Amino acid sequence: MAKYREFKGLDLPSIDKEVLAFWDAENIFDKSIEERPKDNTFVFYEGPPSANGQPGIHHVMARTVKDLFCRFHTMQGKRVERKGGWDTHGLPIELNVEKRLGITKEDIGKKITVEQYNQECRTTVMQFKDQWDDITRKMGYWVDLD
């Protein structure tokens, strides 16, 4: 017999869904900003992820550390604005696009226009955006990506 009995009534996936639904329904992220004074701010600029692939546990770990600072300042009564975006021209994105199109950096402006290249980079980044949005929401990482 085990020294400690397992509590079988704990349904963590259900609790997780309930908390996320509550945060969404009550606009908790927005309230955490709007209900604090505009003259006492802390602005956090997230280094935008280079979303050229699926998010991994290393992204969750890094975002958890970043989130600690934002939540700390929020608990101190500061208006914490979290600003994010997408890295559409990080080296991994550019190499991915060049490989996929069969071009080199020297071909940009010759075989493909700069505008076409930029659009390909944006499209490549957004390929995994839904997965990034999902993991961001599930881990409770509050950031304004718009």
Image (spheres, grey):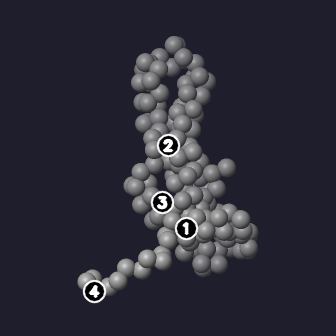
Image quarter in which the N terminus is found: bottom left
Circles 2, 4 touching at the beta carbon (< 8 Å): no
Q: Few, some or many C-alpha atoms within 10 Å of disc 4 (few <14, some 14-19, many ≥20)?
A: few
First-in-chain label (3 vs 1): 1
Mark nearest the camera among 1 and 2 is: 1
Picture coordinates of residue 67, whole percent (x, y): 52, 65
| Of callouts 4 and 1, the N-terminal one | 4
Q: Is residue 141 left or right of residue 55?
A: right
Question: Quick one: label 2 or label 4, which is nearer the N terminus?
Answer: 4
Are circles 1 and 2 on residues that touch, CB within 8 Å?
A: no
Q: Is residue 12 visible?
A: yes
Q: Residue at x 54, y 56 (%)?
A: 136
Within 10 Å of disc 2 (Cα), the crowding (few <14, some 14-19, many 20+) is many
Location of residue 75 with respect to 12 vertically, above or below:
below
For disc 2, the marked residue is 51
Residue on which the image places disc 1: 14
Q: Residues within 10 Å of mark 1 (few under 14, many from 20)?
A: few
Quadrant of residue 70 in the image? bottom right
Q: Position of residue 30 (x, y in %)?
A: 70, 65
Q: Amino acid at mark 4?
A: Lys
Q: Residue furthest bottom?
A: 3
Marking on residue 63 = 3
Badge 2 vs badge 3, beta-carbon distance below 8 Å: no
Q: Callout 3: few (<14), some (14-19), or many (20+) C-alpha neighbours within 10 Å? A: some
Between the C-alphas of marks 1 and 2, the distance is 29 Å
> Real-space Cα distance between discs 2 and 3?
14 Å
Helix, strand or loop under label 1: helix
Residues under numbered marks 3 and 1 in contact, where contact means CB atoms less than 8 Å apart? no
Residue that carries the numbered disc 4 in the rendered image: 3
